[in-house]
Amino acid sequence: MAYVIGVVVLVLGILASIALHEVGHMVPAKRFGVRVSQYFVGFGPTLWSRTRGETEYGVKAIPLGGYVRLIGMYPTPEAVGNPPVRGFFSRMAADAREASAEEIRPGEDHRAFYRLSTPKKLVVMLGGPVMNLVIAVVLLAVVYVGIGTLGSSTTLSAVSQCVLPASSTATECTDADPAAPGAEAGLRPGDTVVAYDGAPVESWEQLSGMIRGTGAEAVPVVVERDGERVELTVTPVVAERPVVGDDGAVVLDDAGDPVTSEVGFLGISPGTELQRQPVSEVVTVTADALWQTGKAVVTLPTNLVGVAQSAFGGAERDSSSVLGPVGVVRLAGEVASADVAGLGVAERVASMLSILASLNIALFVFNLIPLVPLDGGHVAAALWEGLKRQVARLRRLPRPRPADAARLQPLALAVFVVLGGMGLLLAYADVVAPVSLG
């Protein structure tokens, strides 16, 4: 049941993201006077629709996207000088112009999208991707600031009974192993360390640093146990232990072996807890996600080769492989139903929101690719038109005709075919060679 709930929640989240993406296009378009004839979530047969004002709102059967129909997306044949029709591609462009012109009612040419200034076109076309970015930032803020992320706490999860050498692979103590000072002092799992050597303890990182720097000196420690404070005295031993970097990872030498040093050691391990992060962390995480997603888009062709080899050649699929819709849905189900100790409702909710945030960042970055029919393609066309107008103004030439974006229809068809093929490949790979949490 948890798996199904996870899938349903993700699908609803994706649909909401798509719907808001289209709102990002529709609202500024209406604000600038463009008539929006349709607003739909999904493609294919219409499941439900209702007309309000001059716009038909509805839901279609295939939840793989959405659209808003802005009248006059392409300049009319007259606006671009009635270019001659020669060949198949030219006919495609002419058909697109004529279809767009048919949507313009008599006396409404001034309300056509192609009549907008370049800045207004950019606002309309960037409204969708920017909406996805805003959604991602809000979701990440809920996760990092509202819920928090798992981190080491000052509550002890384990207390070692002996001191094992850093190079030892043993998991159990023997009579030959010296007793661990934490256990000797009376520390127990579940104790929360509130003070060490007279200093209040605020975090595990602080406590760990104080223990490592103490040496073999006896120091007082205060713990909270069953609602009461207990005062103990611990004497760390000086033991050889791996050096840990600022990122929490063990430092390795050139040969790949852990770097060690002699430090104070008690033999205690921290528990984990949700720790709320500052707002600045949201900015950092968002910037990193944008960078990583951008790199993934640039390397997408190479990654797809690896996906194809896994799907058809039996090669093992990388855990960081690109996922299609099937893979993302499966991931959500696994997160919701994973039987992991300590993984509570809050952690599962945070994971689901993080997945949705990642999807919205992917939509933001992917839609900025300067190829039609993606939003970035229309942005590029608007910028080209604006550049021509500025050059003409500086050279004191007549205002040029609108950019004939309909000529990009052959490219749009090719991109659509490529995207469709990519989607089918990823869907097939997600079924026969899935990426799993386990």
Image (cartoon, helix red, strand yellow):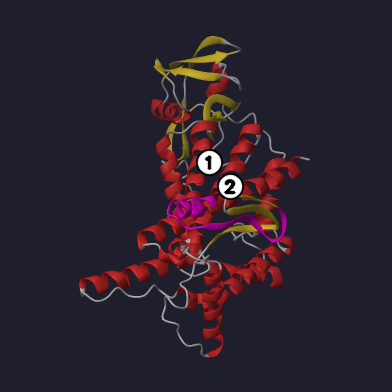
Picture coordinates of residue 143, whole percent (x, y): 53, 37
- Considering the image in quadrants, where does the N terminus appear? top right
Residue 423 falls in image quadrant: bottom right
Left or right of 216 on screen, residue 92: right
Query: Pointer 1: residues within 10 angstroms few (<14), some, or many (20+)?
Result: many
The residue closer to the viewer here, 372 or 396, is: 396
Query: Pointer 2: residues within 10 angstroms few (<14), some, or many (20+)?
Result: many
In the picture, the disc for residue 300 is none
Q: Amino acid at mark 1?
A: Leu
Bounds of the magenta span? 23-48
Q: Amino acid at mark 2?
A: Leu
Helix, strand, or loop for circle 2? helix
Tag 2–tag 1 contact (CB < 8 Å) = yes
Q: Earlier in the sequence, mark 2 or mark 1?
A: 1
The residue closer to the viewer here, 104 or 152, is: 104
Residue that carries the numbered disc 2 in the rendered image? 356
